[in-house]
Image: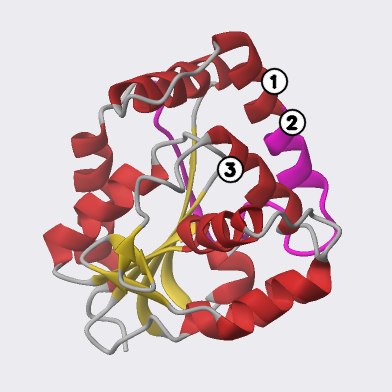
Amino acid sequence: MLNIITIDGPTASGKGTISKKLANKLNWKILDSGSIYRAISYMALKKNLSIFNIQEILLLIKDSKLIFKDSKIFLENVDISQKIRTEEIGSFASKISKFNNIRKVLIDYQRSFYTNTGLVADGRDMGTVVFPEAKLKIFLTANIEIRIKRRFNQLTKKGVSANLKNLAKSIKDRDLADINRSCSPLIIAKDAYVIDSSYIDSDKVTNYIFNIWMNRFCCIK
């Protein structure tokens, strides 16, 4: 078993924030798999590609010069960390993630983030597909209305305009797409701890996961 904590869950369940806090607390590396799909989507949209240009997108992945450093994403030495956080890019990322050949190409790339020190992996299929051998698996969820408000607040805080009604539809559509796709759907791993973060702040959830790790998993070889 590897020193990996996977945190899977739907959009705006809090997994990104909690993964960063947990990685900092453990002094581990972090993998934000959603950022990979968003970065690819950003590149595809810049080239005016649609979700049906799969071969061209696969070539983009092969030739991409993405660098992940200190929780930031660089494309050809330009920081695109904030540019990939729009709903348009999120929607595109959700759509291309349904294609088996794209997901398969990215599995080895995502696994390359692991180091012996440890890794917190945030995504939708981290515990079921990418790192099934992880020591600790978390499935993070939250009430749909709370998730919609969280994402709205995240976007407005960053100065990104958002329509609450359109945002609600986008998140609900993304949930359906994630759950129903044939390849790597969003499901709860059999050995995962399920945490509802609806009414718990991120620090408390982080500490809860940290304590599970320290008390039950950190010494397992």
Q: In the rendered view, tell whether residue 50 sits above or below residue 219.
A: above
Quadrant into which the C terminus falls: bottom left
Residue 180 in the magenta stretch? The answer is yes
Based on the displayed image, in which of its 4 quarters is residue 117 positioned? Answer: bottom left
- Residue drawn at x 33%, y 24% is 159
- 65 horizontally vs 157: left or right: right
Quadrant into which the N terminus falls: bottom left
Label 3 sits on what residue type? Answer: Gly
Q: In the rendered view, tell whether residue 187 sits above or below residue 90.
A: below
Whether pointer 3 and pointer 1 mark residues with C-beta atoms closer than 8 Å, the reply is: no
Label 2 sits on what residue type? Answer: Asp
Q: Between marks 3 and 2, how big is the CA–CA gap?
A: 11 Å
- 90 horizontally vs 82: left or right: right
Which class describes the residues within 10 Å of circle 1: few (<14), some (14-19), or many (20+)? few
- In magenta, the rendered stretch is 173-198
- Residue drawn at x 58%, y 74% is 130
Please tell me which residue lies in front, 152 or 132: 152
Q: Between marks 3 and 1, how big is the CA–CA gap?
A: 13 Å
Whether pointer 1 and pointer 2 mark residues with C-beta atoms closer than 8 Å, the reply is: yes
Give the SS element for disc 3: helix
* Residue that mark 1 sits on: 169
- Residue drawn at x 52%, y 82% is 109
Q: Nearer the viewer, mark 3 or mark 2?
A: 3
| Rendered image: mark on residue 90 | 3
Label 1 sits on what residue type? Answer: Lys
Q: In the rendered view, tell whether residue 204 sits above or below residue 32.
A: above
Which class describes the residues within 10 Å of circle 3: few (<14), some (14-19), or many (20+)? many
* Residue that mark 2 sits on: 173
Q: In the rendered view, tell whether residue 102 sits above or below residue 37.
A: below
- Residue drawn at x 50%, y 18% is 162
Q: Between marks 1 and 2, how big is the CA–CA gap?
A: 6 Å
Q: Position of residue 7 (x, y in %)?
A: 44, 55
